[in-house]
């Protein structure tokens, strides 16, 4: 069901956060990408990003530790690049 509603099939399991050396707020950022897609309102999602993404997407160093932990096999590094472009 989630894959029909959202561009990023993140279930907020938070496995990705555990090994992130930068502490990027990955699940929150994935949720905001989905919110933007579902509402079509980038300005609203960007406003939420400013306080929900305590560690922003641009702090990702593309180490891939998050992707190896993701049960949904999300291309997290790419999605963080998209988030940085959209919200920062």
Image: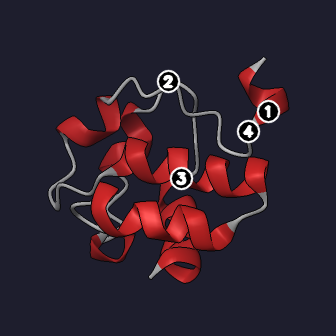
Task: Say whether disc 3 or disc 4 marks the residue closer to the N-terminus.
Answer: 4
* Disc number placed over residue 46 in the picture, else none: none
Q: Is residue 32 above or below residue 14?
A: below
Q: Position of residue 54 (x, y in %)?
A: 22, 61
Is disc 4 surrounded by few (<14), some (14 to 19) or many (20+) residues within 10 Å?
some
Q: Are marks 3 and 4 in contact (CB under 8 Å)?
A: no
* Disc number placed over residue 6 in the picture, else none: 4
Q: CA distance from mark 2 to mark 4?
A: 16 Å
Residue 2 placement: quadrant:
top right
* Disc number placed over residue 5 in the picture, else none: 1
Q: Residue drawn at (52%, 25%), measured in percent from left and top?
A: 11
Q: Position of residue 32 (x, y in %)?
A: 53, 52
Q: Are marks 1 and 2 in contact (CB under 8 Å)?
A: no
Which residue is disc 3 drawn over?
A: 32
Which residue is disc 2 drawn over?
A: 71
Q: CA distance from mark 3 to mark 2?
A: 19 Å
Residue 13 placement: quadrant:
top left
Is disc 2 surrounded by few (<14), some (14 to 19) or many (20+) residues within 10 Å?
few
Q: Which type of secondary structure does the marked residue at label 4 adopt?
A: loop
Please state which of residues 51 and 60 is positioned toward the viewer in this rendering. Answer: 51
Task: Say whether disc 3 or disc 2 marks the residue closer to the N-terminus.
Answer: 3
Please state which of residues 14 and 77 is positioned toward the viewer in this rendering. Answer: 14
- Seen from this angle, which residue lies furthest top? 1
């Amino acid at each position: 069901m989630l894959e029909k509603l959202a561009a990023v099939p993140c279930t907020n399991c938070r496995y990705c956060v555990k090994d992130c050396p930068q502490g990027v707020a990955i699940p929150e950022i994935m949720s905001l990408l989905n919110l933007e897609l579902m509402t079509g309102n980038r300005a609203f999602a960007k406003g939420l990003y400013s306080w929900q993404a305590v560690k922003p997407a641009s702090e990702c160093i593309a180490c891939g530790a998050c992707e190896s932990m993701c049960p949904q096999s999300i291309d997290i590094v790419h999605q963080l690049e998209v988030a940085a472009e959209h919200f920062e």
